[in-house]
Amino acid sequence: MNAPDRLLLDETDRRLVQATQAGLPLLPRPYLAIATALGLSEKEVMARLQRMLERGVIRRIGAIPNHYALGYRANGMSVWDVPDEVVDTLGEEVGALPFVTHCYRRPRLPPHWPYNLFAMVHGRNREEVEEKIRIIQQRLGTHCRGHEVLYSTRILKKTGLRLYT
């Protein structure tokens, strides 16, 4: 199956994406609620979503917490300049820290952007974030050649796949 074929949706898949694109209902059995609304079985809804995951139509189904609503007012993307030879190993270590919500490698953009490792940290205030950043810096040790913290100033809308009628 080539890339365009695997992305094709039948009418039921399209209705399913449209029914879930604003998020799953906050109910004990969200797939049952969607199934009922679409005139499908819960099992069929789950099977269709699984097939779309396997085909890459959707990448994942997950929760997107509103950090501000949970009391986390300081959100800092820490960026690190570490040697390319060890960035993957260090990234796995940093990403395993319980307070790092996501961690990934990015290309450097010299001469202005030397950073190749990114790690998101949340805190109730900037002091809490700075303490977590110190822990990351200790973990990186002598591999850390420099870093910065970029604090969020507003929430950008996070959305997944959207289909319009």
Image (cartoon, grey):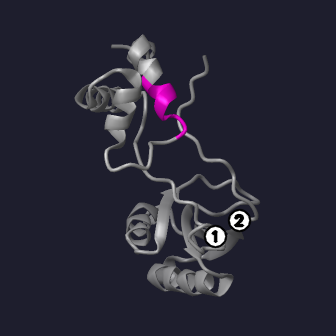
Q: Residues within 10 Å of mark 2 (few under 14, many from 20)?
A: few
Q: Nearer the viewer, residue 123 or 5?
A: 123
Q: Residue at x 50, y 42 (%)?
A: 23
Q: Nearer the viewer, residue 26 or 116?
A: 26
Q: Residue at x 56, y 63 (%)?
A: 118
| C-alpha gap between disc 2 and disc 1 | 6 Å
Check residue 21 for magenta coloring.
yes
Q: Residue at x 43, y 33 (%)?
A: 58
Is most of the magenta stretch helix, strand or loop? Answer: helix
Q: Residue at x 64, y 70 (%)?
A: 76
Q: Residue 16: x and y, percent?
A: 43, 25
Which residue position holds label 2?
152
Say above or below: 104 vs 37. Answer: below
Instruction: Determine whether the residue tagged by mark 2 lies in a helix, strand or loop.
Output: loop
Q: Residue 108: x and y, percent?
A: 63, 55
Check residue 121 for magenta coloring.
no
Q: Amino acid at mark 1?
A: Asn
Q: Nearer the viewer, residue 86 or 122?
A: 122
Where, by quadrant of the figure, is residue 4 drawn? Answer: top left
Q: Nearer the viewer, residue 34 or 114?
A: 34
Q: Residue 126: x and y, percent?
A: 67, 82
Image: magenta residue range:
16-22
Q: Would residue 66 appear left or right of 31 to someone viewing this image? A: right
Instruction: Determine whether the residue tagged by mark 1 lies in a helix, strand or loop.
Output: strand
Question: Are discs 2 and 1 less than 8 Å apart at CB?
Answer: yes
Q: Residues within 10 Å of mark 1 (few under 14, many from 20)?
A: many
Q: Which mark is residue 118?
A: none
Q: Would residue 118 appear left or right of 47 to someone viewing this image? A: right
Which residue position holds label 1?
75
Whichever of callouts 2 and 1 sits on the residue coming sooner in the sequence is 1
